[in-house]
Amino acid sequence: MRWREDVPVVGSVELPPDPHALDALGRNHSLETALADLVDNSVDAGASSVLIRFIQRNARLIGLYVVDDGHGMTPRSIDTALTLGGRRDYRATDLGRFGIGLKAASFSQAASLTVLSRASGHEAVGRRWLQGQNRDGFHCDVVPEDFAVAELDRTWPFSTSPSGTVIRWDQVGGFPASEDPHLVGTFLSRTVDHLRGHLGLMFHRILAKGKLSITVDVEDVDEGVGVPAEVRPLDPFGYRHGPDGWPKTLATDVDGVALSIQCHIWPGRSNNAEYRLPGGAELRQGLYFYRRDRLLHAGGWEGIHAPDKKLQLARAAIDIDGDVSGLFTMNPEKSRVTAGAGFARAVGAARAADGSTVTDFLHAAEQTWATSNQRETARRRPVVPPGRGINPRVSREIIDELPQLNESPLNILWVKFDNNDLFHVERETMTLLLNRRYRAALLGGRRGGLNDAPLVKALMFLLMENVFQGAHLGSRDKDNIDLWQEILTAAAQAELASFGGRG
Ligand SMILES: Nc1ncnc2c1ncn2[C@@H]1O[C@H](COP(=O)(O)OP(=O)(O)O)[C@@H](O)[C@H]1O
Ligand SMILES: [Mg+2]
């Protein structure tokens, strides 16, 4: 047959999606990203208060609520809201987008989703959806009005009247199936901490404006509500003064679309929560993508550079609203932004008003790290320099992290002893001698070499380098050496015994 431009058809069949398709939704969610997605909806509904409440009975966690005082849903709009992919007219500032957030986030964590809502001037409405309940289509249960009212009027710390919404999860998969109060308590405190960190970071711009408050609490259905914890904004750029000349805004055009990158440099490592973000400061270097003031993605270089300890002070904010959105894709969980192929090129072309490039930014950040690290290092107690026998990687870290005394380096070497002591301090030759009898056991049978046993030697260095300082051994040093000898020799003998006859 010759090639035909049009494909002929003879009719159509209806293929509604199998309800199991729901199971695959939101696979990339964690509890925190799922809850952030529900908070997005509360923000879009103009809420000024959001409460996340864990529900406990006899120590066991049995459910979770997300409550807000936003504009709520009308009896008509709640059905669109629960429809998968049901979309409304979004305003330019809305966080919602795909019409799947509520469903994907909820079913990623819970087997039962109940939505109860009241819009100003309308009666309360409720729907419940059980995952896997409806094998024959997408049916959703209708909750009676009196139950919807009762849930909306529970003892929340704020009023859901005239309008508000209660999202309720039951059968939450990630909760421990345990009634052990200690285990559940540990789970809760860790989970609440993570959650506050994550929400504080993702919503920091919105929270800082002061129009929204988010709290987290725990209710024991028999004993009442615990102390609420407020989510505080965690601004990744929340330092006082950066190095001179920074931050700078680098700008460029991508096919006629303006892209701008706010390049910040922290003045040095800090103990502030803003610096030590969830996940650790070192992993949080790099790019921060915002959409409508909601942080979507915190850190990483998206192919501009590899992560590097020396770049940990560098963080840059990019707003991906409006036209530039074509350069990026965001996953439906809104937890990750992926930059398209044009992005690295655009970044390379970006310039600040004074001509600075991204390379200048990275360079300045590295420079700032080096100077501030020297300052921090200088405050530490100085050590004798590491010498022979110590693994070069360990030596490099010691030199990076600690000020060095102007003395001969300390060597750590194995020799034959005629007793069972693990070590001997030989100050004249600046050598810590180790008893070769234990070498094979400590190496676990691996082959030795000059720089072997790096961990043992690093520990010995940190413990004992001090006694190699100064003109002579003090009585305190002598006493410490005796103490270490007793304990470490016992440890070495235990290593030898468990290594067996093999050594
Ligand atoms: N807390 C809420 N308050 C008011 N309306 C809500 C709330 N949560 C969800 N909705 C409604 O449900 C709709 C669907 O939500 P969702 O599945 O998250 O998709 P999207 O936010 O992308 O529209 C929202 O557009 C909104 O109309
Ligand atoms: Mg949404």
Image: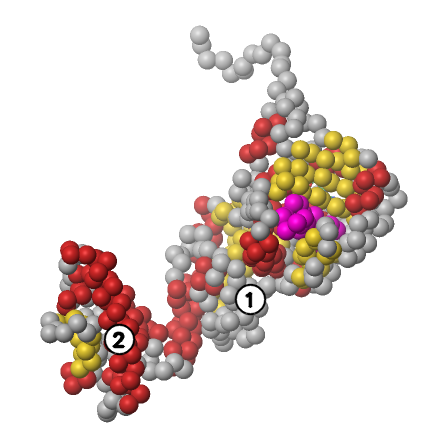
Q: Callout 2: helix, strand or loop?
A: helix
The structure residue drawn at horizontal position 51% and vertical position 65%, both measured from the top left corner, is: 276
Q: Does the magenta stretch mainly form a helix, a strand or a loop? A: strand
Ligand 1 lies in quarter: top right
Residue 193 visible in the current orientation: yes
Q: Quadrant of the C terminus?
A: bottom left
- Residue 361 at what x, y percent from top left? 45, 65
Residue in the picture at 56% in, 12% down: 8
Q: Is residue 406 left or right of residue 433?
A: right
Residue 447, horizontal then vertical, whole percent = 15, 58
Q: Label 1: few (<14), some or many (≥20) within 10 Å?
A: some
Give left or right: position of 131 versus 210: left
- Ligand 2 contact, mark 1 (Cβ < 8 Å): no
Does residue 316 sit above or below 270 in this rendering? above
Vertical order, 120 against 188 (above or below): above
Q: Which mark is residue 486?
A: 2
Residue in the picture at 80% in, 50% down: 154
Disc 2 residue crowd, few under 14, some 14–19, many 20+, Cα 10 Å: few
In magenta segment, residue 65: yes
- Residue 237 position, x and y percent, is 55, 66
Rendered-image quadrant of the N terminus: top left
